[in-house]
Image (cartoon, rainbow, N blue to C red):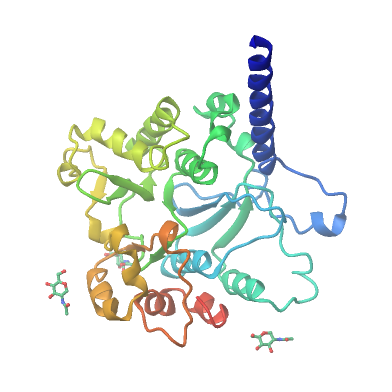
């Protein structure tokens, strides 16, 4: 009996171990013995000559683990990137891929006429957009979270992609300062005159992590440091929100000595600014469908009138495909205005 139990547990352990190795492999650099492909590899952010300028960069992280190696950005993700670049010519926009990523094989030579390339072309018309690879181990070296990464808890997460993205956003801002944005936002305004060190409230008790800013040197960097430490102490791979919004919310509760996001004023938070809901999350996630409903068009545009960026809740809204000709809805109106090239190049659907 005992023997059977030991066998069963061993098998479970081995299967678990194999699965962890599998997902870990996503993030490992590969060298394909093929010059043609290798020359299309995105530069590594740490090896590139063009590094992010401290405090003058906007970052996006793409963490999905795809079996093929090529850049995959759908129209909505590209829209977020374009809107950031268009509204912020004075910032560098870094799009960081956590798994080894390549330009499409013939991208630089023969033109492949598919939607995905049109979208990529639209983005690369901006000279402030940089696409880079990130090797999460090298990226974490000499940071407060390297030892934790090596222990492997991250790779046991039930929400690996989300949690890797959470991990990387805090780490990136710790390293370079600047602004992190989720890939499901539309940026409406320039960040030129917005002082770094901010986040946005999503409700009276939650500070969201879809828009985050820390500076690289002063108090912002200290908060980034606290976030990295809180991340590893409280990490929970079974809870989607614990390691992203959870981290910044807990850290700010501690710093500002209050649980209410309404009371997290600059005065209480040593200069850190928690913007009210309408600046980044004007449409609550429960109302995500309003972005796709003609009858809510004016209402959404009105509610987002004073937004700096608009979060569109891809976690829920990804399933809704818009046929452009048929629908006159807020999402397409905003996209037309704030990511015109991507919108134009995305074909019949958005
Ligand atoms: C590529 O696609 C664009 C837009 O769909 C079209 O205008 C163009 O003619 C196509 N080019 C080729 C070479 O097929
Ligand atoms: C930022 O402020 C400066 C000085 O007041 C002003 O000239 C500039 O137009 C502002 N930039 C934006 C994007 O609002
Ligand atoms: C726009 O929203 C504000 C409140 O956010 C409301 O008072 C106003 O009536 C709305 N305007 C329109 C035209 O819906």
Position in image of residue 262 (x %, y %): 16, 46
In the shown orientation, is residue 239 left or right of residue 249?
A: right
In the shown orientation, is residue 101 left or right of residue 145?
A: right
Q: Does residue 281 appear in this view?
A: no
Residue drawn at the location 50% of the way across and 42% of the way down: 159
Position in image of residue 65 (x %, y %): 63, 49
Residue that sits furthest to the top in the current view: 2
Nearer the observer, 136 or 270: 136
The picture quadrant where one finds residue 136 is top right
The picture quadrant where one finds residue 112 is bottom right
Count numbered badges in the picture.
0
- Up-down: is 302 above or below 179? below
Q: Quadrant of ligand 3?
A: bottom left
Residue drawn at the location 49% of the way across and 27% of the way down: 144
The picture quadrant where one finds residue 336 is bottom left
Nearer the observer, 265 or 311: 311
Position in image of residue 210 (x %, y %): 39, 52
- Up-down: is 63 above or below 158? below
Residue drawn at the location 27% of the way across and 72% of the way down: 300
Nearer the observer, 38 or 89: 38
Q: Does residue 221 appear in this view?
A: yes
Residue drawn at the location 59% of the way across and 59% of the way down: 130
Q: Quadrant of the N terminus?
A: top right
In the shown orientation, is residue 113 left or right of residue 88?
A: right
């Amino acid at each position: 009996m005992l023997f059977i139990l030991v066998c069963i547990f061993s098998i479970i352990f081995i299967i678990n171990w194999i699965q962890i190795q599998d997902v870990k492999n996503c993030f490992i650099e590969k060298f394909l013995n093929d010059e043609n492909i290798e020359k299309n590899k995105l530069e590594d952010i740490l090896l590139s000559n063009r590094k992010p300028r401290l405090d003058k960069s906007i970052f996006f992280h793409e963490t999905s683990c795809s079996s093929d190696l090529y850049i995959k950005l759908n129209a909505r993700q590209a829209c977020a990137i374009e809107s950031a670049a268009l509204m912020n010519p004075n910032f560098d926009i870094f799009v960081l891929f956590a798994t080894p990523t390549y330009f499409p094989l013939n991208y630089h030579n023969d033109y492949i006429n598919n939607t995905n390339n049109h979208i990529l072309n639209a983005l690369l018309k901006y000279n402030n957009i940089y696409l880079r690879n990130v090797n999460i181990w090298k990226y974490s070296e000499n940071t407060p979270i390297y030892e934790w990464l090596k222990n492997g808890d991250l790779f046991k997460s039930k929400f690996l992609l989300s949690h890797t993205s959470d991990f990387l956003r805090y780490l990136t801002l710790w390293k370079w300062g600047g602004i992190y944005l989720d890939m499901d936002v539309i940026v409406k305004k320039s960040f030129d005159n917005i002082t770094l060190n901010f986040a946005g409230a999503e409700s009276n008790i939650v500070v969201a992590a879809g828009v985050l800013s820390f500076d690289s040197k002063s108090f912002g960097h200290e908060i980034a440091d606290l976030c990295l430490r809180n991340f590893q102490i409280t990490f929970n791979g079974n809870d989607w929100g614990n390691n992203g919004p959870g981290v910044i919310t807990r850290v700010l509760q501690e710093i500002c000595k209050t649980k209410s996001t309404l009371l997290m004023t600059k005065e209480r938070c040593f200069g850190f600014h928690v913007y009210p809901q309408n600046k980044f999350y004007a449409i609550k996630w429960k109302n995500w469908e309003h972005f796709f409903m003609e009858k809510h068009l004016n209402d959404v545009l009105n509610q987002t009138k004073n937004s700096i960026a608009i979060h569109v809740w891809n976690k829920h809204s990804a399933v809704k495909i818009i046929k452009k000709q048929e629908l006159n809805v807020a999402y397409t109106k905003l996209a037309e205005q704030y990511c015109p090239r991507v919108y134009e190049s995305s074909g019949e659907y958005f």
